Image: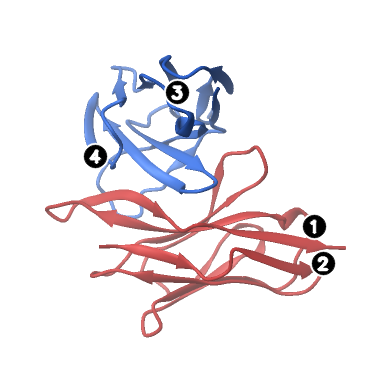
Chain colours: A blue, B red
Amino acid sequence: KAGVTQTPRYLIKTRGQQVTLSCSPISGHRSVSWYQQTPGQGLQFLFEYFSETQRNKGNFPGRFSGRQFSNSRSEMNVSTLELGDSALYLCASSEGNRISYNEQFFGPGTRLTVL
Amino acid sequence: AQSVTQLDSHVSVSEGTPVLLRCNYSSSYSPSLFWYVQHPNKGLQLLLKYTSAATLVKGINGFEAEFKKSETSFHLTKPSAHMSDAAEYFCVVRGLNYGGSQGNLIFGKGTKLSVKP
């Protein structure tokens, strides 16, 4: 099976712009989670989608949003970009059922730079 | 609330010597624990996971971790380091949602492992 893919891999934006990142999960996986990785804050959970519904959400402002499509592909959007949004954004997919220890498979990430 | 603390931000070892990366957890219930590795400019890869079936967990690439409830620890070890082990390692606990369902992954700050020739 192909792994988790994320596009684009690199992105440069300026403050105030908005950006959309895309994630294609492993075939058959219904859950997609998004994480932000920065040197200062480390890896932080943004949100999780399962069957087109947001199932879980981290502590990020409303500028960060996401959605999931019927084919399980997911997008996240950040509006009104700030310098502090510069980060590696990681997407992870899993089968999504509520069995314990459900493994998450991570994509390579999208490196967002805000100037 | 669940959390993990990685006790060392950097660890340096010589090739062929043992590796020990330390992690303590805090959880009000029996935790789900994981170790992930991240090589430069790569995504995260699962090394191993604690399933409560056995306290000593074996993972990929010769890594293993021991769950010690009395010490609330889940340290990662490897008998002999290879140059290719140089990477950042994350200890992770799965959070718990309101109502008791499994939640998102909560990551430690990471430990950068350097391997000297």
Query: Residue B68, position in %: x, y?
Result: 42, 80
Given the image, on which type of amino acid does mark 3 rest? Ser
Mark 4 = which residue? A56
Pointer 2: residues within 10 angstroms few (<14), some, or many (20+)?
Answer: some
Pointer 4: residues within 10 angstroms few (<14), some, or many (20+)?
Answer: some
**Disc 4 and disc 1 on one polypeptide chain:** no
The residue most toward the bottom is B70
Pointer 1: residues within 10 angstroms few (<14), some, or many (20+)?
Answer: some
Q: Earlier in the sequence, mark 2 or mark 1?
A: 2
- Find residue B85 and report its image quarter: bottom right
- Find residue A58 and report its image quarter: top left
The residue most toward the right is B117
Given the image, on which type of amino acid does mark 2 rest? Glu
**Disc 2 and disc 4 on one polypeptide chain:** no
**Disc 3 secondary structure class:** strand
C-beta proximity under 8 Å, tags 2 and 3: no
Is B71 drawn above or below residue A89 in the view shown? below
Mark 3 = which residue? A24
Given the image, on which type of amino acid does mark 1 rest? Met
